[in-house]
């Protein structure tokens, strides 16, 4: 009927309304283009490093760092792994991070349990003092901790590194966990008391299992913190073969000067464990970061 | 809006809700038993030995001359007087301030921008967010070494510049004393923006969509919505981001120590790297601790405001 009618403003508007899904689709395409470009830009350095880590030294020196690969040299990884000491470094990191995370969370959950479920005198002050200790710039502690560990005969040993990582992180975890535990209803504890459970049983059998989501988040978070730390290991350790991954990477950098392919391989090895934890526990990890932000 | 913003990932939402205590408890059950007192005292003792006691000693050592071989001799405020005349200290202070402003400002703006851009739940969004977030899990040292390769004279950065016709801007980025500091802020930013984005994403999820609807009804433009709805609603997240950024930039030792150790000619020296170098390379422990106290003084305001917020919260 209206097929031959010349375009009126009303008809144009009607067409525009009919076409809106197209405009929406264009906006979606625009969004995905922008977001892909941004993501690619962010990922570009990683991609380039991955490529370089598989190129032979002759290829990198001859064709330049930006050239397309003309070689495939997974041997860079074995150079970094055994020659560069990354294997020993990963073992050292495991020896330090796993007990450090476990001990931190155990001690922090004990303190958090007592401070959140019982009437402790000066409760708030204690929590804030512990949190305040965690916020101190670590620089103020470096010299005294190095000296203290020498006096105790523990200097240049992995246990002292574990102790420092535990002590320095503790306050933050106590703060987060006690906030979480305070929201567990009192009735649960009262019921357990009536059933004759002691304070320890309530902690171990009731409160800790209920705190699991927060513990999982903090576990993922604190593993990456301890694993990635540089300052404490280079302060309390001197022997190169005792260094965990992060400082060992600097050793590798000094050992393979200008071998960008081996340094790239070492960086990739150093990044794999935390990337694995992130991918496996992504949800906990993100939750942990948001927990970390005191609101 | 296809997705209600209350549909945060269940874990995140539960945790966020749970961490915020609802009401003060009217006293817990019964008097604490010896076991419970032990539960508090053991962690407190661990922290006292590894943090509080060393911190007090650190302040004391800053008042002494000490090379680690001879016993320390009391020096009063000598080390602090020395700071005023020390050009490297001035440079490090200036660089730390610059780092704070550039690194802090750009990571807050970039993180907020990315969060707003990637805010809506839609197909593929998880991949984009993961790409932005991936560098956050790398250690700063690994990040620094990756970028060291990219900054080589024939590396990616110069390659990209000549690719877009800016070949004249090519530099030996890390070896040049006028670019070394700025070149090192970039990897730190690359890693921090994803972190700040995550904080802002959580904040944006918490904004009631009815506020935007109301603003639209009142004819507010996109900018006005951002200025008068989004920003005020993000106030508490902003406070968190500011303290995280300040604490992180005062701690950003790893990048500079891995790449230039403050060089060339102290041009990229930060307070944290200068402190470490003074104490552990030059074994001047007294002056090193005085520099650490200077860092503490700078961080003090942030620490106190963070604690005040925490105090209000644990009410």
Image: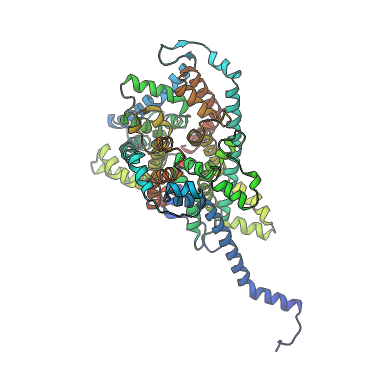
Residue A48: x and y, percent? 49, 51
B294 is higher (above) or lower (below) than A89? above
Residue B290: x and y, percent? 51, 20
Left or right placement of residue B194 versus residue B33 in this view: right
Give the mark count. 0
Residue A232 seen in the current view:
yes
Residue A107: x and y, percent? 33, 35
Residue A120: x and y, percent? 37, 31
Quadrant in the rendering for residue A187: top left
Q: Nearer the viewer, residue A39 or B42?
A: A39
Left or right placement of residue A96 versus residue A28 in this view: left
| Quarter in which the N terminus of chain B is drawn | bottom right
Residue B21 seen in the current view:
no
Colour scheme of this structure image? rainbow
Looking at the image, the residue that sits furthest to the left is: A196
A78 is higher (above) or lower (below) than B294? below
Looking at the image, the residue that sits furthest to the bottom is: A1
Q: Nearer the viewer, residue B186 or B221?
A: B186
Q: Nearer the viewer, residue A259 or A142?
A: A259
Residue drawn 37% across the image and 30% down it = A164
Q: Nearer the viewer, residue B191 or A59?
A: A59
A180 is higher (above) or lower (below) than A23? above
């Amino acid at each position: 009927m209206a097929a031959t009618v010349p375009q009126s403003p009303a008809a144009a508007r009607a067409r525009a309304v009919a076409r809106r899904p197209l405009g929406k689709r264009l906006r979606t395409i625009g969004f995905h283009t922008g977001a892909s470009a941004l993501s690619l830009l962010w990922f570009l350095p990683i991609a380039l490093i991955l490529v370089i880590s598989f190129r032979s030294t002759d290829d990198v020196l001859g064709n330049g760092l930006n050239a397309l690969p003309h070689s495939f040299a997974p041997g860079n990884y074995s150079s970094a792994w055994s020659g560069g000491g990354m294997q020993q470094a990963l073992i050292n990191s495991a020896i330090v991070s796993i007990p450090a995370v476990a001990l931190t969370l155990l001690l922090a959950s004990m303190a958090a349990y007592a401070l959140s479920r019982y009437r402790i005198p000066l409760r708030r002050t204690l929590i804030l003092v512990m949190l305040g200790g965690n916020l101190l710039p670590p620089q103020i502690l470096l010299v005294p901790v190095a000296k203290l560990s020498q006096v105790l005969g523990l200097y240049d040993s992995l246990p002292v590194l574990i102790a420092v990582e535990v002590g320095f992180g503790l306050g933050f975890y106590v703060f987060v966990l006690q906030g979480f535990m305070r929201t567990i209803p009192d009735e649960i504890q009262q019921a357990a008391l009536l059933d004759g459970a002691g304070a320890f049983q309530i902690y171990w059998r009731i409160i800790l299992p209920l705190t699991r989501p927060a513990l999982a988040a903090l576990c993922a978070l604190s593993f990456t913190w301890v694993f990635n730390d540089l300052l404490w290991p280079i302060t309390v350790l001197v022997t190169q073969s005792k260094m965990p991954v992060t400082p060992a990477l600097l050793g590798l950098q000094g050992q393979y000067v200008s071998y960008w392919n081996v340094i790239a391989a070492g960086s990739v090895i150093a990044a794999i464990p935390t990337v694995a934890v992130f991918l496996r526990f992504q949800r906990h990890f993100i939750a942990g970061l948001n927990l970390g932000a005191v609101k | 809006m296809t997705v209600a913003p209350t549909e945060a990932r269940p874990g995140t939402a539960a945790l966020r809700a749970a961490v915020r205590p609802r009401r003060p408890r009217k006293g817990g059950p019964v008097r604490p038993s010896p076991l419970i007192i032990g539960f508090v005292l053991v962690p407190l003792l661990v922290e006292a030995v590894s943090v509080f006691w060393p911190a007090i000693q650190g302040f004391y050592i800053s008042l002494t001359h000490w090379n680690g071989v001879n016993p320390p001799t009391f020096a009063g405020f000598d080390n602090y007087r020395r700071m005023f005349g020390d050009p490297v200290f001035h440079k490090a202070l200036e660089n730390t301030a610059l780092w704070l402003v550039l690194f802090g400002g750009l990571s807050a703006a970039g993180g907020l921008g990315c969060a707003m851009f990637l805010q809506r739940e839609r197909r593929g969004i998880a991949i984009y967010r993961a790409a932005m977030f991936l560098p956050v899990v790398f250690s700063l040292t690994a990040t620094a070494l990756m970028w060291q390769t990219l900054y080589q004279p024939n590396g990616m950065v110069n390659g990209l510049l000549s690719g877009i016709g800016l070949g004249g801007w090519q530099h030996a980025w890390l070896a040049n004393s006028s670019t070394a500091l700025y070149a090192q802020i970039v990897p730190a930013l690359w890693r921090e923006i994803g972190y700040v984005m995550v904080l802002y994403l959580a904040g944006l999820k918490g904004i009631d969509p009815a506020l935007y609807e109301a603003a639209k009804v009142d004819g507010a433009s996109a900018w006005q919505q951002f200025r008068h709805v989004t920003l005020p609603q993000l106030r508490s997240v902003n406070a968190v981001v500011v303290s995280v950024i300040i604490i992180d930039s005062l701690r950003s030792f790893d990048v500079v120590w891995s790449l230039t150790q403050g060089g060339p000619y102290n041009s990229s020296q930060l307070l944290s790297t200068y402190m470490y170098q003074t104490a552990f390379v030059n074994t001047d422990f007294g002056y090193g601790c005085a520099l650490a106290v200077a860092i503490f003084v700078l961080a003090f305001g942030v620490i106190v405001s963070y604690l005040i917020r925490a105090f209000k919260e644990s009410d």
